[in-house]
Image (spheres, rainbow, N blue to C red):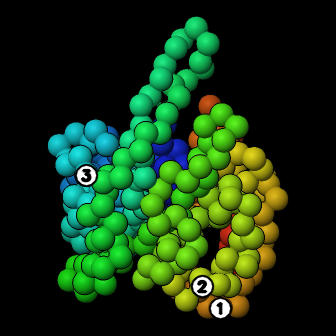
Amino acid sequence: MIILSTGSLHSYGLNRVFDLAARAGFHGVEVLLDQRWDTRQADYLRHLQVVAGIPIVSLHSPFVSGIQGWEHDQLSRLKRTVALASELGARHVVAHLPFRFAYVWLSASWFLDKPVAVPLPAPNRDREYGRFLREELATCEKSTGVTVVVENLPCRRLGPLRYNGYRMNTLEEWGRLPSLNFDTTHLATWGLDILATYERLKPRIRHIHLSNYNGKEHRLPWDGDLPLKELLRRLTRDQYSGYLCVELDPESLGAAEETEVLENLRRACAFCAEHLGGLE
């Protein structure tokens, strides 16, 4: 099933994204939960499914703090997301890995275009959340019927320096978790071969975030150097039964013009369908 992440157009209203996803030909939607109540209220989300005629099959747990009315810590937010997914009948919840750092945001309007995040060591941050991911995901799935797919995360930068902002964010540690969300552009930020990584981890891959990489993340499928066509062909060969989620960036879609957005979404959906060879 080819689905669209609403995070691809997080600068649009949620109802508009549902409408565009349906018009572009996607089979379903992954809703990124964020500060907006629209993304977290079951009745409204059911309403959007009916109006747009397209199902919510996956939720993405909030990965930022300051979610109004929800707890601050990642574990509590994940549990609430799983409960919402169960209520909606969504099969998957996407979760991020635990943070390694706390961040101080610096803003100086006279020489910075946007605030800069400076990482500070936080050895106890998300410790319980990490234990839950390692030890309790199988129990969570059995009791709720929802699969929590854990996402590999990108290389972070502070000026010219690269660093890993997340615990368990190596192929060895992340790859031991029971159900994986395989993000192509995030792997590319580390210079990893996405085909070799897929072959290594495919027994645990249940969910894929698909986008290209050209030095910027979450590019259109044809805008970058990643072998996405071959990856899709291998999914067909292996009879992949999970979700293929197109997750892009508003800028790459041309969000300033809705006609351009719709055309790019249609092309992205068609790209996946063509190279999957009709795999549902």
Task: Estimate the spatial distance between the alpha carbons at disc 2 and disc 3, rounded to whole Å.
Answer: 30 Å
Q: How far across and how far down the image is residue 165, in percent?
A: 50, 51
* 213 left or right of 147 in image: right
Q: Residue furthest top?
A: 110
Position of the C terminus by quadrant: bottom right
Q: Are marks 2 and 3 in contact (CB under 8 Å)?
A: no
Q: Which mark is residue 238?
A: 1
Q: Which mark is residue 134?
A: none
Question: Visible in this render: residue 154?
Answer: yes
Name the quadrant containing residue 91.
Answer: bottom left
The answer to whether 176 is drawn above or below residue 37 in the figure is: below
Looking at the rendered structure, the secondary structure element under dot 2 is helix
Which callout, 1 or 3, points to the residue nearer the camera?
3
Looking at the rendered structure, the secondary structure element under dot 3 is loop
Which callout, 1 or 2, points to the residue nearer the camera?
2
The foreground one among 190 and 240 is: 190
Q: How far across and how far down the image is residue 207, in percent?
A: 51, 74
Q: Residue at x 28, y 39 (%)?
A: 66
**Label 3: which residue?**
73
* 216 left or right of 6 in image: right
Task: Estimate the spatial distance between the alpha carbons at disc 1 and disc 2, rounded to whole Å.
Answer: 9 Å
Q: Residue at x 60, y 37 (%)?
A: 158
Whichever of labels 1 and 3 marks the residue nearer the N terminus, that label is 3
Q: How far across and how far down the image is residue 219, in percent?
A: 69, 50
